[in-house]
Image (cartoon, helix red, strand yellow):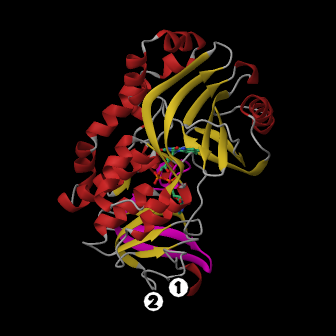
Amino acid sequence: MLEHDRATCSRSNKGEGPLQSNSHAPTAEVDALIVGAGPAGCMAARRLGKAMRVLLVDSSALPRSKPCGGALNPYSWKFLQQFGPPRHLFLDPEEVKFRWVDFDSKLNRITELEFKNVSREAFDEWLLSLIPDTVEVRDKTRFLGYESNCHLTKVRLETPTGGLTVSTRYVIGADGALSQVRRRVLGGDFATYACIQDWVERPASMPPYFDCIRIKGIGDGHAYTYAVPKGEAALVGSVFYPGATAQKAKHGQVMEMLRDRLGLGPTTKRESAAALQVRSGRDVIFGDGKVLLTGEAAGFISPTSGEGISYALATGDLCAQAILAEPDRPLEKYRAMSAGPARNITRKARKLALLEYRAGHAVLAAMPLGILSWMTKRL
Ligand SMILES: Cc1cc2nc3c(=O)[nH]c(=O)nc-3n(C[C@H](O)[C@H](O)[C@H](O)COP(=O)(O)OP(=O)(O)OC[C@H]3O[C@@H](n4cnc5c(N)ncnc54)[C@H](O)[C@@H]3O)c2cc1C
């Protein structure tokens, strides 16, 4: 059994105490078990928690700290308007424009694509606060696997005090890039990008751009680097293709190069994370029976830009809507409701070649600004 005083999550760390006391005995039978309390899991829990018994588990301590650029695109921002996003999410500068940079081909183009610049930690904590109190939230609780029959799924969890099996009608895999639920549904492995990002002191002269930087000299396996001002700090991250070697050394090389060019201060924190590699619409997997995948675990992340928050918010919500609309056949309903985002992934994947080959950058450099901005907004 879960021991509530150790595994229960306090949804706010602002000194208000837990939003949900979880003083009752932990539940071993629920209607829906959601794995992962990122944007996708929070949106699914928000909607389903009003209608059924929901258990939301996350292997991390909550509120979590996920390495991320913290750039919300216009679709994320539009979706979030219904909840009135609070001011404290923003970092200076509050908006950043996307800029293409390639030191070798002298590409340097500021586009009209604008992101809201937020603290990812504050953002994720705020999303947790949107979940109704009826949802049981357990952090430091890891999904291990499941067995299904036609009525019920038995999910094995590892909690701080030992193993637990929970019976549920629906499982929602919202467990991100390294999803164990996706692995179980696929019956095999999948590829991920590796990302390493440094927090550095922000140089006074750093402009309000989200830079996407290509550097030829770093060698094979380096996809791109991003740099963005974040309040008094700046974030510089490198993305590596699956199987890339010497990632840490290559990121160190990038940092040395950018320290000179951008005048970056010393690194105060280094962190790493994975991002799912999506190269075609076939990488989007909706689930199996009453086990549904959502957000990045389903393959909803832009193949071209790595933007995943807008997809996670939208598909987490759609997944819950599908269960409520078609309780006996939620997978078919979810697939139909998510056809738009899935087509969108397919369209973006077709543009990968333009970005991955050096000749593509010459095309970007030559495009009229209006067309470049239009195209960038669709990556
Ligand atoms: C370095 C980096 C920078 C990024 N920058 C941006 C950006 O600027 N803008 C943007 O839109 N997107 C960005 N992304 C992508 C974005 O962060 C993700 O696509 C988005 O967070 C996906 O949301 P999600 O809810 O699907 O999964 P996640 O946010 O990844 O949440 C998954 C949750 O599942 C939990 N979990 C995992 N395994 C288990 C398990 N076995 N049991 C229980 N819980 C588990 C994890 O602890 C985690 O809390 C970035 C990604 C990376 C790696």
Q: Is residue 92 magenta?
A: no
Q: Which mark is residue 117?
A: none
Q: Is residue 285 left or right of residue 101?
A: left
Q: Which residue is mark 1?
A: 4
* 315 or 121: nearer the viewer: 121
Q: Secondary structure at mark 2?
A: loop
Q: Secondary structure at mark 1?
A: helix
**Residue at 57% from the left image edge and 15% from the top image edge:** 357
Mark 1–mark 2 Cα distance, whole angstroms, equals 7 Å
Q: Is residue 157 magenta?
A: yes
**Residue at 71% from the left image edge and 23% from the top image edge:** 220
Q: Is residue 256 above or below residue 198?
A: above
Q: Amino acid at mark 2?
A: Ala
* 14 or 187: nearer the viewer: 14
* 330 or 184: nearer the viewer: 330
Q: Which residue is mark 2?
A: 25
**Sequence order check, earlier mark of 1 and 2:** 1
Which residue is farthest left?
325
Answer few, some or many: residues within 10 Å of disc 1's Cα (few below 14, many 20 plus, some between 14 and 19): some
Residue 173 at least partly seen = no
Corner quadrant of residue 224 = top right
Where does the image place residue 259, in percent across and percent down from the top left?
A: 77, 34
Q: Is residue 312 above or below residue 60?
A: above
Where does the image place residue 282, in percent across and percent down from the top left?
A: 40, 32
**Residue range corresponding to the magenta coloring:** 153-182
The rendered magenta stretch, by its main secondary structure, is classed as: strand
Q: Is residue 204 above or below residue 9?
A: above
Q: Is residue 131 left or right of residue 92?
A: left
- Residues tagged 1 and 2 counted as in contact (Cβ below 8 A): yes
